[in-house]
Image (spheres, coloured by chain):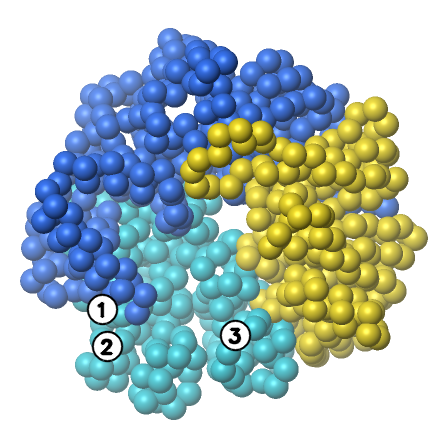
Chain colours: A cyan, B blue, C yellow
Amino acid sequence: MPFETVNSKVVRAQVTPQRAVLARRGAMLGLTGEVVFRPVQGQGAGVGGRIGAALASESNAMMATTGSGSVLYGFRGLHVTVLDLDGREQLFVEADRLLAHDADLQTSVMFLGSGGLRGAVRGAATGQGLFTTQLSGVGAVALLSHGGAFPLQVSRGESVGVDPQAYVGHTGQLDVDLKAKVGWRDAVGKGSGEAFQLQVTGSGTVYVQASEKKF
Amino acid sequence: MKITSGDTYSAATLPSGDNVNAYAFCVDLQGEWFVKKGAMIAHYGTVTFEAVTAYTSTRAFMASRFSSPIYVQDWVVASGNGKVLLADRGFDVNSYDLDDGNLTIRAHNLLGFAPTLDLKQSIVPGFVSLFGTGTFLASSNGPVIFVEPPFRADPEALLGWADCPSPAIHYDTEWMAASLGGMLRGALGRESGEERQYAFVGAGTILLQSSEIVREDPALLRIIEQQTHSLSTGQVGALGQRLVARAQQAQQ
Amino acid sequence: MASLTADGRILNVDLHGDVVRAAQGSMVAYTGNVDFKGAGMGGGDGFRAALKRKAAGESLQLMECSGSGRAYLAVDAQYVSVVDLANDTLSVESESVLAVTPGLKLDVKFAGLGGAMAGQGVATTTVTGTGQVALLSDGPMIRLEVVPGQPLVVDPQAFVASSGQLSTSIVSGVSWRSVVGEGSGEAFSMKFDGSGLVCIQPAER
């Protein structure tokens, strides 16, 4: 059952005993009915080991909404984009851009960066690299973005460069690689440290937000 | 020179008492209106803006509209004739008409109101109540969502309510137990909406918005400081230490 | 010829082997062969320009987008509007300039409007010539006409751009006979007289 779009920043979910919703902590704006919230730890396996999972949890604190009622979700006035997964494609979303999703969807967390687990630890500390949540199955997903997200189609043979701060997620057969690029720092902002871009190749859709600042 | 999209307005063609776009409202001022400091973005005609506090002696009835010393400093009186454009942080702006009614709204989001209305501080910190007949303007982070009781709202998402009684605080004790048991981060930090909600019952309307990015509200600081007057010296010291610890932890 | 198209909060920059100057850091995505590199303040060359750069601070940092392809630009989820200039002049609040096509000349003035402006640099960028300018605004831009006899008063923090035969003066906004308390208000406003167009945003900076 999809999320109902109330406005560009708020969605409504009907929670039933058959259908629970997993949402980001702090995302509940209001509710009617007999609905219960419980914190959940992390989002399944994926990043190597307990350290990896703990790191993933840092950026991905979730809660389960169960019971019977109607819940409004939103977060800090950020724009909400709803995607319905039909089971054929997987959706990759930057972990802390996930507002809410059907609890039935299978999830795991991946780290988009370089250097394996050590890279993940370093990346989480310095912000170089992205934790992405991989979702599959049939169900609805609500994503957060600053200013709204727009889709960019990528076809074989093409390459699309994306500012990591503006990357929301992607579907399809895409390779998303984090690469250092000379001169990129001029393009994507005055941050310190090395400058990274996401290079997207393959066939699919990448979602980009209308702002160069993450949130 | 050509600008793609949108219309150009003049003093004559600006709407009277209506939105210019979702984020700006035009008041056709003929007399006086209370306006939040900083809300005026442009105006035609002859309009002056004076702090409400300046009216305490000369036009006492104006100042008496504010029975709250906490908020009076945030307001000015716009007087004169002309089209006045009001806006707030790029938020959605809407006008509301009260007909011998009442509405309580988050003080930070109230932009302006006709002097026929009375403003009082609400028992719920951060909110003010308007009574009487007249028009007022309020901003919201995204379009306003209207719901009816029974309803529980995240305190940060609550924009206001009309006609129903003031809300009670509902604590989700099981959430809190689960949080402490699991040693989750944030146990010492700000309460999240899942732990504590404002619960509404009765007949009326509740106004909601997507939760706002917490912005510094000097009025809230005044309110809370006012409430500490009832603490003993020992309690004041203990509170001070806890606040300092929290500020230091937040900076890490 | 490079062309700019506004799409809500995104600016589409289509490059055909030429160079578009844009606000540094504003690129969110691109396709094709596009290069980005820093281009300084856009205040001209020479010692005078270097002084302007220092005075106007960081309000207008530009980069050059060159090559063939499309660059998608955005800043802070602000709305984008495109203005076509045909041998015209447009005065823009420097922070609100997103991009300009080649052939337009940029000049940055740092107006210290007397003592009242301490700490608040009013950096205005003047854009002259023929081409396209992309402007940013916090919320959709509102365009207001100024005609002789009907001056317009504007909150400087809402001011985005102006054009035409306008004279600008400062008027004090609020009388602070009893100045107690925090928060800023309209300490002063900009008054436009004459004949022209003023663009404002529904927000204060």
Q: Are marks 3 and 1 on the same chain?
A: yes
Q: Residues within 10 Å of mark 1 (few under 14, many from 20)?
A: many
Look at mark 1 in the image and give the residue it sits on.
A42
- The three-letter code of the residue at mark 3 reads Gly
User: Is residue B111 among the parts visible in the rendering?
Assistant: no
Q: Contact (CB < 8 A) between labels 2 and 3? A: no
- The three-letter code of the residue at mark 2 reads Ala
Q: Which residue occupies the foreground of this view, B63 or A209?
A: B63
Q: Contact (CB < 8 A) between labels 1 and 2? A: yes
The tag earlier along the polypeptide, 2 or 3, is 2
Look at mark 3 in the image and give the residue it sits on.
A191
Looking at the image, residue B18 sits to the left or right of residue C147; the answer is left
Look at mark 2 in the image and give the residue it sits on.
A53
Image point (53%, 81%), residue name: A195
Q: Residues within 10 Å of mark 3 (few under 14, many from 20)?
A: few
Q: In which quadrant is the C terminus of chain B drawn?
A: bottom left
Q: Are marks 2 and 3 on the same chain?
A: yes
The tag earlier along the polypeptide, 1 or 2, is 1
Q: Contact (CB < 8 A) between labels 3 and 1? A: no
A88, above or below C139, in the image? below
- What is the x, y in percent for residue B113? 48, 21
